[in-house]
Amino acid sequence: MNRDISQQITVESGMFKLLTEGLRNTLDWKVQGNDFSRKLTTLRFMAQSFQRHLEHLLALEEFDGYMTLVEEKAPQLARSVDALKVQHEKFRTGSRRILHGLERLAATDKTRFNDTCDEFLALLEKIDDHNQRESDLFMEALAREGGGEG
């Protein structure tokens, strides 16, 4: 993997982590009363940033990043890479659906708002699990390349 791409992925992943943390803080924001319009506005803004960055980071991983390296260095892990790519598509679809729902959500529909927040939190958890699997796969590929167990 090209050193510039490696650095870019490291920076982008760090920014993504910060965005995810900001999203979690926004989702955890306790609203007093029935007016959650401020939280909804902030959540829409954060969700838009998250969506754009998610798309960008996934494209980097798939086309210039670690996935290509894993497939080159450890072709026997290609199925695992393919499974991660399938998850990427689910994340794209899920985050777009959530964002679309937030954009159409009325600031008075607290039930739908809470359901959407729960759905967003669930997506973030799946992405966290996925990121750990990506890291494990990358380390496995490096171990195999270096003559480690595998």
Image (cartoon, rainbow, N blue to C red):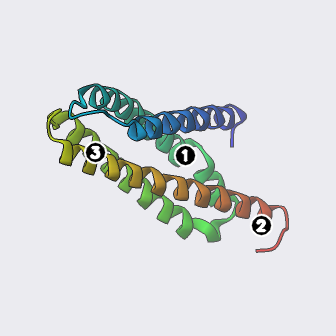
* Residue 98: mark: 3
- Quarter occupied by residue 52: top left
Q: Nearer the viewer, residue 10 or 36?
A: 36
Q: Amino acid at mark 2?
A: Arg
**Can residue 56 be seen in this snapshot?**
no
* Residue 124: mark: none
The secondary structure type at the circle numbered 1 is helix
Of the 4 image quadrants, the one containing the N terminus is top right
- Looking at the image, tell me whether mark 3 or mark 1 is earlier in sequence order: 1
* Residue 144: mark: 2
Residue depicted at 46% across the width and 57% down the height: 126
Q: Position of residue 11 (x, y in %)?
A: 63, 31
Whether residue 63 sits left or right of residue 49 in the image: it is right
Q: Position of residue 100 (x, y in %)?
A: 22, 40
Whether residue 63 sits left or right of residue 106 in the image: it is right
In the rendered picture of this protein, how many numbered marks are placed on residues? 3
- Looking at the image, tell me whether mark 2 or mark 1 is earlier in sequence order: 1
Q: Amino acid at mark 3?
A: Ile
* Residue at the extreme front: 33
Residue depicted at 54% across the width and 59% down the height: 129
Q: Amino acid at mark 1?
A: Glu
Distance from label 3 to label 1 (Cα)?
Answer: 23 Å
Residue depicted at 64% across the width and 66% down the height: 75
- Quarter occupied by residue 26: top left
Of the 4 image quadrants, the one containing the C terminus is bottom right
Please name the residue that numbered disc 1 is placed on.
61
Vertical placement of residue 97 versus 106, above or below: below
The secondary structure type at the circle numbered 2 is helix
